[in-house]
Image (spheres, rainbow, N blue to C red):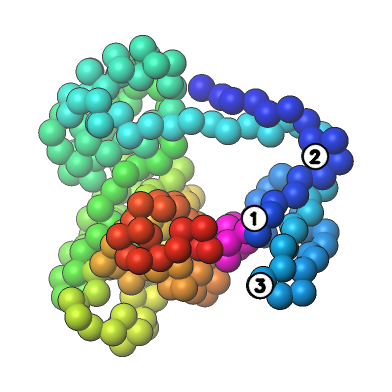
């Protein structure tokens, strides 16, 4: 399903964009930053973008497993609501990452028959303790890349590893970044885009550290979940 917005008369202007949003906008494909006004954080800041010649579109994608754990029922719910794009997460009672290659082929056949495509895999990659053997986790991740190929999917939602409770996250920065860089290298070789969610308890669960991840790892993209920031005491408007 697609929602089309009217053409803006000259330029698109965003009032007081948060820091993470600024970073995402700088990477946006629909325009380029032309000027910035505002003398301090207390003053309104406007980002001005040149218009492009096509209509702006929002493409809706759903976690269909929130309607049912059963794939056939998920497809029925999607068709009822007119949604043809999903982030595949739960499939017949298990996470998509646990599918075998043959199971992935069967899932793809069902989705194709229903005219449904994938926006991303809703994976648990990076949603693991730093104490877990990374080689084992990386092997699971490699399987996920193969699943993407079978499912014709170009993105994986992932995370930046759980920090030991009551420990300073900065102590684990190098380990987190090294592990994410390994994952990004493998994903790049496979033509897959990794998108990071700000899950509570992981390294990137605050606006400061999410911005650090996006800045230091430019191949990484973001999934912004404001509810997770609320759990971490982050001001979602400022973020």
Give the alpha-carbon distance from disc 3 to disc 2, as whole Å.
29 Å
- The x and y percentages for residue 22 are 62, 61
Query: Quadrant of residue 98 in the image?
Result: top left
The earlier-in-sequence mark between 3 and 2 is 3
Estimate the spatial distance between the alpha carbons at disc 2 and disc 1, rounded to whole Å: 15 Å
- 147 to 23, vertically: above or below: above
Task: Name the residue that disc number 1 marks.
Answer: 25
- Location of residue 83 (image quadrant): top left
Mark 3 packing: few (<14 Cα in 10 Å), some, or many (20+)?
Answer: few
Mark 3 and mark 1: span between their CA atoms? 18 Å
| Residue at image location 21% in from the left, 64% down from the top | 128
Looking at the picture, does residue 227 appear above or below residue 106? below
Q: Which residue is mark 3?
A: 41
131 with respect to 51 (left or right) = left
The segment highlighted magenta reads 17-25
Magenta stretch encompasses residue 170: no
Percent of width and height locating residue 146: 32, 45
Q: Is residue 127 left or right of residue 38?
A: left
Q: Nearer the viewer, residue 49 or 105?
A: 49
Q: Earlier in the sequence, mark 2 or mark 1?
A: 1
Disc 3 element: loop
Question: Residue at 46% across / 43% down in the picture?
Answer: 154
Q: Residue at x 79, y 35 (%)?
A: 8
- Check the image and report above or below for 177 versus 116: below
Image-based side of 20 in relation to 150, left or right? right
Between disc 3 and disc 1, whose residue precedes? 1
> In the rendering, which numbered label is found on residue 52?
2
Please tell me whether residue 19 belongs to the stretch shown in magenta.
yes
């Amino acid at each position: 399903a697609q929602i089309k917005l009217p053409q803006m008369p000259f330029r698109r202007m965003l009032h007081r964009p948060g820091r993470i949003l600024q970073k995402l906008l700088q990477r946006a494909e629909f325009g380029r930053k032309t000027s910035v006004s505002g003398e301090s954080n207390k003053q309104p800041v406007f980002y001005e973008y040149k218009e492009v010649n096509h209509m702006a579109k929002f493409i809706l994608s759903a976690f269909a497993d929130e309607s049912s754990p059963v794939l056939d029922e998920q497809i029925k719910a999607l068709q009822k609501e007119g949604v043809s794009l999903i982030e595949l997460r739960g499939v017949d009672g298990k996470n998509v990452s646990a599918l075998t290659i043959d199971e992935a082929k069967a899932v793809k056949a069902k989705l194709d028959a229903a005219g449904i495509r994938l926006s991303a895999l809703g994976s648990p990659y990076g949603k693991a303790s730093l104490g877990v053997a990374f080689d084992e986790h990386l092997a699971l991740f490699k399987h996920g890349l193969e699943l993407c190929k079978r499912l014709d999917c170009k993105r994986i939602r992932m995370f930046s590893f759980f920090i030991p409770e009551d420990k300073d996250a900065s102590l684990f920065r190098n380990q987190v970044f090294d592990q994410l860089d390994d994952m990004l290298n493998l994903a790049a070789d496979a033509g897959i885009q990794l998108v990071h969610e700000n899950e509570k308890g992981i390294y990137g669960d605050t606006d400061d550290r999410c911005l650090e991840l996006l800045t230091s790892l430019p191949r990484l993209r973001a999934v912004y979940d404001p509810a997770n920031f609320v759990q971490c005491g982050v001001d979602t408007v400022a973020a």
